[in-house]
Amino acid sequence: MTETATDTGATATDDDLPAFLTEEHAGSWSANLELDRYADDRESLVDHALLAVERTDPAHHVNLVTHPEHGDPEPYLGDRLRERFPEASAEVVDQCGCGGYVYRVER
């Protein structure tokens, strides 16, 4: 079991992370943060979103597909993203049919 520490202060084992967060991504990609595990756990969603951005190569983007339970991601993700990745740009690009959002972050 490998431990992964994030700059958010959380330490998780790789076994606790969804598969899409256990590897680096060389190009643009999407992180599925609309899984049931995030419905009642916004803090994990935010931690995993920040980790997804961290694991995205610069000059590429990650689409953070957020859980519909939390609504528009800008109010709860925007400041945290800008604080941790001041060089990044972020914007809501779409709302999914299920009610979640696609929040694109480019480094």
Image (cartoon, rainbow, N blue to C red):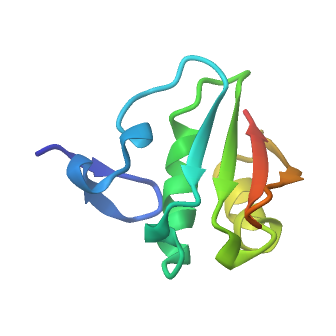
Instruction: From the top left corner, tell me how far across and down residue 7 is, in percent.
Output: 46, 55
Q: Quadrant of residue 67?
A: bottom right
Q: Quadrant of residue 79?
A: bottom right
Residue found at the far left of this picture: 1
**Is residue 59 positioned above or below 99 on the image?**
above
Q: Quadrant of residue 22?
A: top left
Look at 36% across and 65% down and name the residue there.
10
Look at 75% across and 42% down and name the residue there.
105
Residue found at the far bottom of this picture: 40
Instruction: From the top left corner, tell me how far across and down residue 39 is, in percent.
Output: 54, 76
**Is residue 80 positioned above or below 43 on the image?**
above
Question: So how many labels did they put on this image?
Answer: 0
Horizontal placement of 46 versus 37: left or right?
Answer: right
Look at 67% across and 49% down and name the residue there.
64
Front-most of residues 26 and 87: 26
Residue found at the far top of this picture: 26
Instruction: From the top left corner, tell me how far across and down residue 57 is, in percent.
Output: 60, 24
Front-most of residues 99 and 44: 99
Horizontal placement of 32 versus 90: left or right?
Answer: left
Q: Quadrant of the C terminus?
A: top right
Instruction: From the top left corner, tell me how far across and down residue 42 is, in percent.
Output: 55, 75
Look at 71% across and 65% down and name the residue there.
77
Q: Quadrant of the N terminus?
A: top left
